[in-house]
Image (tube, helix red, strand yellow):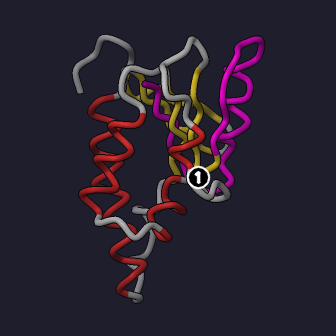
Amino acid sequence: MHVIIGGAHNGKRDYVKKLMVGKEYYWLDFSVEDSPFDAIPNEPTRHTVVIEHIESWLTTTNLSEETSIQKIVEAVEGRDVIFILTDIGRGIVPMDALQRALRDACGRLYQQLIAQADEVTRIWYGLPQTLKKRGEIG
């Protein structure tokens, strides 16, 4: 698993598109998929699965935070996956309770994904910075 993380509109998607040149992949945008997990092939394939906007899905799902995280982790098990994550936890603490809950849920989910990831790259205005390399413990 490779996690790409950065702020909104910082070049994460463009970076992943460059990584995927010449490769076969499924691109899943969780903000527009009605049933995003149904779009993931049942059997792991040689295709990389790119998943973006899981934070949008977290705002609309009726599942509990714990169940949501479990569903995401189980859906990608044994697959070559790239997660594009938008860092929403470094700014001003939202006054709205629902927005604070989303920020906190994303933080907990991101911690799990990053812990399981083989590689983690932060994108800062188009510049990639490797935070975790394959084989490192983190």
Residue type highlighted by circle 1 = Phe
Q: Does the magenta stretch include residue 121?
A: no
Foreground of the two, 38 or 114: 38
Number of callouts in the render? 1
Q: Position of residue 84 (x, y in %)?
A: 55, 41
Which picture quadrant has residue 32?
bottom right
Give residue 90's quadrant in the image. bottom left
Q: In this view of the protein, which residue sits in the foreground, 3 or 42? A: 42
Q: Position of residue 111 (x, y in %)?
A: 29, 45
Is 21 drawn above or below residue 70 in the view shown?
A: above
The residue carrying mark 1 is: 30
Eyeballing the image, is 38 above or below 62? Answer: above
> Which residue is found at the position 58% from the left and 46% from the top?
52
Residue at coordinates 27% horizontally, 33% vertically from top-left?
Answer: 115
Residue 22 lies in the magenta-colored region: yes
Between 38 and 10, the one lying in front of the other is 38
Task: Give the percent coordinates (x, y) of residue 69.
Answer: 31, 51
Q: Quadrant of residue 19?
A: top right
Element marked by disc 1 = loop
Q: Position of residue 102 (x, y in %)?
A: 39, 70
Farthest residue, direction right: 22
Above/below status of 25 relative to 107: above
Query: What crowding class fits label 1: few (fewer than 14 Cα within 10 Å), some (14-19), or many (20 or more)?
Result: some
54 sits left or right of 66 in the view: right
Residue ID at (40%, 70%): 62
Q: Is residue 32 left or right of residue 74?
A: right
Q: In which quarter of the image is the C terminus?
A: top left
Quadrant of the snapshot with the N terminus: top left
Bounds of the magenta segment: 1-28
Does 69 sit above or below residue 42?
below
Residue at 43% across / 29% down in the picture?
120
